[in-house]
Every structure is written in C-alpha cells, then in structure tokens.
Image (cartoon, rainbow, N blue to C red):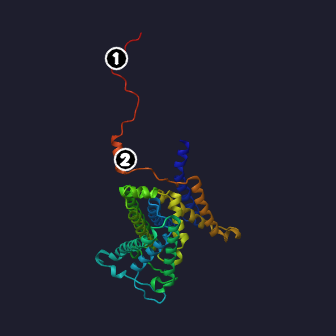
Amino acid sequence: MKRVSVESLVPTACVVVVTALILGISFEQTGDPERTLRFYVSFLSVATVLAIFALALNLQWGYTGVFNFGVAAFFLIGAYTAAIVTKEPDRTDFEEYIGGYGPDLDVAPFLATDQWFPFLVAVLVSGTVCGVLAFLLSFPTLRLREDYLAITMIGVAELTRRIAIEEQWLVNGTRNLGNIPGPFQNVLDINDYRYVFLAVAISFLLLVFFALERSVRSPWGRVLRALREDEMAAEASGKNVRAYRTQAFVLGAVIMGAGGAMYAFGARAIAPETFTHYFATFIIWTMVIVGGSGNNKGALLGAYVVWGFWQSTLLIQSYDLPDVVQVRIPFIRDMLLGLLIVLALLFMPHGLLPERARVSVWAERAARRVRPPPAGPAPPSAEPQEDKA
C-alpha cells in the first residue's frame, strides 16, 4: 500500500515541480508578475497544441500499435495548409506561396466571419489534407511492421520537408511564411490575443480529448487494443485488421493536421526549419512515453511535463553561466531529455499515468448494478437472548 501511495503522488509532484520551475525562474529573471503571467500563458499555449499531437500519436501507437515516426510530416502539412488558406494573396517579391483565400472566406460580413470562419475552414482543410495523405500512405506503409514502418515514415517526413524547402513557389521555400492571421486577431490587442488563443486551443484540446475517450471506450476502441496486443488473434476473431489500422492511422493524422493549424495560428510565422524530426516527432514521442502510452490523460500530463522540462532548460540558459556550460546548453538539454526517457522507462515503464485495464463504460455500469453488496458484520438479532445464567 505504501508503494501504491507513493506512485500515485508522482504525477502530481511532477506537475507541481514543473509549474514551480517555470514560474519561479521566469519571475526571478523578469521581476514582474504580469510579464511572468504572459510567459506562462505562452508556455501553456504551446503545451496545449503539442498535447493535441500527443493525443493523436497515442491513438496511433498507444491504442493501435502503429509505429508512426513521421509526425513531422503531418505537423508541417497542417501548419502550412492553414497558413495558405487564411493568408491574403501574396503581393510582394519576398513572399511567394499558393493559396491566399482568407479574404474570399468572409462570406457574411454582418456576422464578422472574417474573424472566425477562415480559421474554422483552415482547421477542417488541414485535417482533411493530412487524412487523405495518411490514407494514401496506408497502402504501402501499413503492410510494414515496427522498425520498418518507423524508417519509412521518417523518410516521408523528410521528403515532405525537402519539398517545402526546394519548391520556392509552394510555401515560400526556406524563407519564413509570416503574418499568419489568427482568430479574432484584428479586434483584440496583442496582449489580449494570447489569452483568447489559449482559450481557443484549450477548447479544441478538450473536444479532441472527450471524442477520443468515447471512441477508445467503444467497441471500436476495444478492437484497436486487440490489434495492439495480438493481430493474429484479432484476425482470427473475424476483424479486418488492415481496415482498423487504417482507420486509426487516418484519424490520428486528421487530428495532427488540425493541431498543425492551431500551431500556425499561435506562432504567426513558420518555416521548414521549425518542423525538424527532433522537435516535431521526437519530443511528441517523449510526451507519450513519459505520460503513459494507452492513456489519454497520460498523454496530456506528458505534454505538460516534457514541455515544461524543455522550457526550463531554455530559461536556465539566460543565467550567467560559465562559458564551457553556456555554449553547450542546447546539447545538455538534449542529453537531459534522453535521460528523462531512460529514467521513465526504468522506474515507471508504463508512464506517469499507466493504462487502466477496463472493458467499456457500459460493462462497468452493468457490473456495478449486479454487484452484490459488500459483506459486513451480521445485524444484531431482534430475538431476546436466553439467560445463560
């Protein structure tokens, strides 16, 4: 009981430590509570967007066993699709890109559709494009298993990034694609926009979370877990293994594309160098592993803890450190992130919030209705006791 009690406190302790580090270091460097709050809001915004990717990857890997190591491809495509849908047509020689449909999507000016409708369309289009790409990739890739699938998806992600770099006319090449509009941006002050964007991002994250929770607890979700555990047994039970793997892969890609759109709205400027394998794939895998594979709550927790760990190391860089340490902070940060994964696998191999063994919500409710009452001491008899004297 003592071991279980200690393990149950670890997730809370991690959240408290990360929050204390972010707020404490930021306040020590700025000395201004308002600036510290703005930094924390920006931190939460990025963590929220990355948590969307963690949920999508958890669906693919945690519940289905699809080893998708090409998250960067869907991240990049979702972000760039949202940018070219919402931006105005290019009017300068410095920017060259396709699309620019933002002004055309102001379909009802009396409803201020220019402040929200283009972004809703961009999220839907980004998710659809990534879903179509995942569906096309499912034919040659999902036949592969484990490391072969991972290597193939790494190649897909690198190919996507090289296309964005080399094809200058497509998304402005190596130059930043900046001035990406955001929802309600033109009617809000820049200091207020970050709070509105955080509210929008959290709302979208909660929508994805509850939708996935209902999905994985349904019969469809139980089939996915069966595929993860033993594909041969699931196929012997009459399940179409390839169809279910494709469905999970495509749905996860749709969520990743929508997450890329949210990232573009928050960052306001994107470039191909942003979507490296380390940032756009490895860190998201770290979030799922540390938080708990096969548990959506664990994916959320892992996103917060890992991104807080990452930001803490960046804040430490602003201290007056010895030169031998100062110039090596990025490498030390990468080494510490790898060490975090090793420690998590050694001491908590199932993550901070391990997957719960459960059948379904309906089965649990039925079991509670028919479960007998707990045994207890027999009630005292109403009959008078004989006098043994």
Give the quadrant of residue 222: bottom left
Give whichever of 84, 42 is nearer the camera: 84
Mark 2 Cα-neighbour bin, 10 Å: few <14, some 14–19, many ≥20 = few
SS category of the residue bearing label 1: loop
Q: Quadrant of the C terminus?
A: top left
Query: x, y (%) of residue 67?
Result: 49, 64
Is residue 128 visible in this depiction of the protein? yes
Give whichever of 13, 234 is nearer the camera: 234
Tell me the amino acid under the disc marked 1. Answer: Pro
Which comes sooner in the sequence, label 1 or label 2? Answer: 2
Query: x, y (%) of residue 330?
Result: 62, 69
Asked if 348 appears above or below 384 in the picture, the reply is: below
Disc on res. 286: none
Give the residue number, with chain letter if any, for mark 2.
364
Give the quadrant of residue 25: bottom right
Disc on res. 384: 1
Is residue 35 visible in this depiction of the protein? no
